[in-house]
Amino acid sequence: MTGELQPGGEGVRRLARLSERLARSPDLDSLVGTTLAGLAELFGYEHSLLLLLDERGEQLFTIGSHGYPSEGVGSEVRVGDGIIGMVADRAEPMRVGNLGRMLAYARTVRRTYEQGGGEAPGLEIPLPGLENAESQVAVPALVLGQLVGVVAIESDKPGRFGPDDEALLTVVATMVASAIEIDWAHERAAGDAAGGDVASRPALTPPSPATTRVRFFAVDGSTFLDGDYLIKGVAGRVLWVLLGHHAREGRIDFTNKEVRLDPSLELPEFRDNLESRLILLKRRLDERDAPIRIDKTGRGRFRLLVDGDLRLEEVETDR
């Protein structure tokens, strides 16, 4: 389905259509969905991943995927590990046509997670992937030489991807990285203009009688809803802070700026990736059909919606 990247080629026209769609995306959440859906619809890449670099530059976290039974939002890849991690480390594309045993370890990790259980820190969300994947292309998403993330596609057919696919995906990744940087800048500017606090508003609908137990492990931010693992790290800590405000003050409306300035989150001053973490958290909650939701209400603003009561439990130390 892909076209050669030559003047007047079909591939160039499809790239132009994707560029137009990205330009019309109003926020990061829409941008992620548009990118992955466009890779499938316009170029025939039915299985794709978009991962972003974390605040410390040590891990990549999945912000969205397409074509897998589970979206795997929040799954992580350490920089330098596997094909995706090596692409991030080297900031260079990689294309593999016969994966074979290279995926054996990842499959073992995925099965180990699925067979595990219990509420404890250190759990991992499995990275989405084809069990019988044979071909993969991963490319860095760069802006002015700085790594923003990695875009990857895979197939169960050996030798499925060639140089044109790698070149095309590199162009897409560059467009996406630039769009993400622009969105981050707009969100931060809007958040700064909005100020630190917003007035609390009452819930729009009566809560249900159900109570959700939220258990939070301070050691790594691991968060569980009614015994089921949700998320960890910065996103888990952000959720815990928001739920604390909701429980104590009835807050539902927040600004990105006040969250960014919360000292308990210990976000870095430069490239804190807060907007990406909020989208990750929103998508993870939506994926789990959780009784807690995050809705964007404008640039630099969002609303926390809770269906029912909460029972918050914090575990201070690992055990």
Image (tube, grey):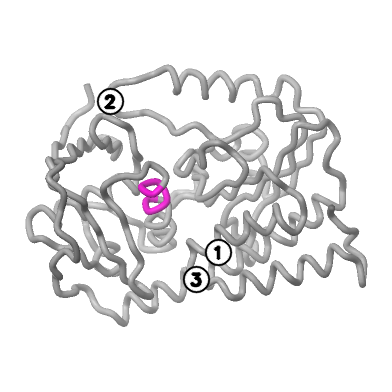
Which residue is under mark 2?
120
Picture quadrant where residue 205 is located: bottom left
Give, as a single range, the part of the protein colored magenta.
Answer: 281-286
249 lies left or right of 114 = left
Graded by Cα atoms within 10 Å as few (under 14), some (14 to 19) or many (20 or more), the crowding at tag 1 reads many
Tell me if residue 206 is in the magenta stretch: no
* Sequence order check, earlier mark of 2 and 3: 2
Which residue is under mark 3?
183
Viewer-proximal residue among 171 and 279:
279
* Sequence order check, earlier mark of 2 and 1: 1
Q: Residues under labels 2 and 3: Cα distance? A: 35 Å
Graded by Cα atoms within 10 Å as few (under 14), some (14 to 19) or many (20 or more), the crowding at tag 2 reads some
Please, what is the three-letter code of the amino acid marked with disc 2? Ala
Which residue is under mark 1?
31
Q: Name the spot of residue 284 as percent of width and height, x first.
A: 40, 46
Residue that appears at 13% across and 67% down? 202
